Amino acid sequence: MEPSETTESLLEDWPEAIEAVRDDKLGEAFVWLSSEPSLRPQLLHCLWTEGHVDQARLVSLLIPAWQGPTQPRLALRQRAWLAMFKAAGFIGFDATTGRAIPPPLTTLTIFRGASERGRHGMSWTQDLEIARDFAARYEGSVFRAAIDPRAVLAVLVDIAESEVVVNPHMIRRRTEFLEMADSAQMEERRRRQGTVFGS
């Protein structure tokens, strides 16, 4: 594969990643970008829009691209994420067992910890405690939604959480405030950050 000028410009500081793309080894390119995971979504979207990534490859590369950045939405516009997830079709994977997860067939209750401004994001969880932790992190609130299974783009389970990736346009009217972030959790988080920054 001959990288386009856009791809070469994106990876100008990563010659090994450019070489991996040239050799059509996109998984290796992702490995080279492990210290700069925010570039993975941009690289994947660029190659996909240029027609270098078919549906099967998109499925295999989309999750490492999504899970690489701390905040995927900041690495790539929501519209671009939605286009790729829709093209890939539902993705369900349990990393703790290595097994696929079938798409949900019934209403799913999900939670999100975020600021009021960020309540309509793509990343939710089925674990209320995880949502509470994120609410404390952002000094925001916990939101809840009972959603149509057709709004679910992916279900990703690992040792840390059960993430549900959704199309936010399909759940906007179903999202409701549940509770404020726990003040004790927020104080503990501030204390830990102060310890880290002060050490």
Image (cartoon, grey):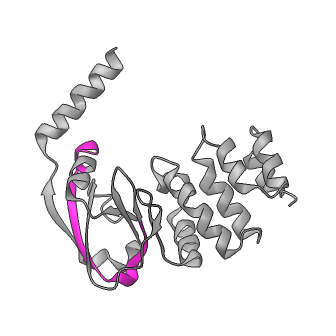
Residue extending farthest to the top is: 199
Q: Position of residue 20 (x, y in %)?
A: 79, 49
In depth, the one of 129 and 180 nearer the eye is 129
Q: Which residue is drawn at 40% across and 65% down?
A: 122
The spot of residue 52 in percent (x, y) is 77, 68
Q: Residue at x 44, y 58 (%)?
A: 95
The percent coordinates of residue 97 (x first, y second) are: 42, 60
Quarter containing the N terminus: bottom right
Residue range in magenta is 135-155
Q: Is residue 83 above or below residue 140?
A: below
Q: Nearer the viewer, residue 20 or 111?
A: 20
Q: In this view, does 25 lie above or below 187?
A: below
* Residue 147 is a magenta residue: yes
Using residue 98 as the reference point, say whether residue 171 is left or right of it: left
What residue lies at 61% left-to-right and 41% top-to-bottom?
34
**Rendered residue at 65%/73% (across/down):** 56
Q: Quadrant of residue 128?
A: bottom left
Closest to the observer, 163 or 176:
163
Decide whether residue 101 is among the magenta residues: no
Q: Is residue 109 left or right of residue 53?
A: left
Which quadrant is home to the C terminus? top left
Tell me: 5 left or right of 41. Answer: right
Q: In this view, does 60 lie above or below 8?
A: below
Relative to 104, 24 lies left or right:
right
